[in-house]
Amino acid sequence: MRAVIQRVKNAKVEVEGKTVGKIENGLLVLLGVGKDDNKEDIKYLAEKIINLRIFDDENGKMNLSLLDINGELLIVSQFTLYGDCRKGRRPSYSESAPPDIAKKLYEEFVNACKNYNLKVETGEFGAHMQVSLVNDGPVTLLLDSKKVF
C-alpha cells in the first residue's frame, strides 16, 4: 500500500462538479493499493499516518500528530501510485490491485482511520476526480507499507 501524504490548510475532492469530500487543517492522503496488500498493510499505514509528527508545536517544530491537533483527513484512491515508468513510455500498473480487491482494502483503510475518532472524508473510488488543496509548508511525504521507500 502506498500513500502520498500532504499537510494541508484545506482540501476537497469533486466528482462531476460536486464536492464529495472536504477538510480543513489536516492531511490529504492519496492512497494506492498493491496486488499483495492485506490487513497488515492497512494497520501499518493507518497507524503511521495518524501518528506522524508533522504538525508544528508552539515552537514551530514539527512535533505534533494529526491526533494531537485534532486534524482532519481526506483519503483519495489513486491506483496510479503503482505506475511503473521504468520501461517504455506508458506506465505499467501490473503491481496495483484489481479494482474489486483495491476497493475493499481502500474501504477497510478508511474505516481503520475512522477508528481514531477524527473527521475522515473520502473521494469516490474509481471515479474521475478533481482534487484541490492548499499545501501547508509545503509538507509532502511518501509512504509504502512494504517499506520500498
Image (cartoon, grey):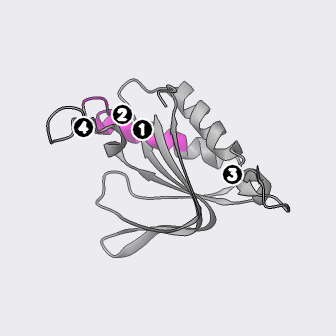
Q: Earlier in the sequence, mark 3 or mark 1?
A: 3
In this figure, which residue is indicated by the disc labeled 2? Answer: 101
Q: What residue is rendered at 69% in x and 51% in y?
A: 54
Q: Secondary structure at mark 1?
A: helix
Q: Is residue 102 magenta?
A: yes
Q: Secondary structure at mark 3?
A: loop
Picture coordinates of residue 86, whole percent (x, y) = 24, 33
Mark 2 surroundings within 10 Å by alpha-carbon count, few (fewer than 14), some (14 through 19), many (20 or more): some
Outermost residue toward the bottom?
Answer: 17
In this figure, which residue is indicated by the disc labeled 4? Answer: 85
Mark 4: amino acid: Cys
Q: What residue is rendered at 44% in x and 27% in y?
A: 37
Please indicate whether residue 117 sits to the left or right of residue 132 in the image.
Answer: right
Mark 3 surroundings within 10 Å by alpha-carbon count, few (fewer than 14), some (14 through 19), many (20 or more): some
| Magenta-drawn segment | 94-109
Q: Main secondary structure of the magenta part?
A: helix
Picture coordinates of residue 111, whole percent (x, y) = 57, 44
In this figure, which residue is indicated by the disc labeled 1? Answer: 104
Spatial distance from mark 1 to mark 2, Cα to Cα?
5 Å
Above or below residue 18? Residue 8 is: above
* Number of the label disc, if any, that sits on residue 54: 3
Q: Earlier in the sequence, mark 2 or mark 4?
A: 4
Q: Earlier in the sequence, mark 4 or mark 1?
A: 4
Q: Secondary structure at mark 2?
A: helix
Q: What residue is rendered at 14% in x and 36% in y?
A: 88
Spatial distance from mark 4 to mark 1, Cα to Cα?
26 Å
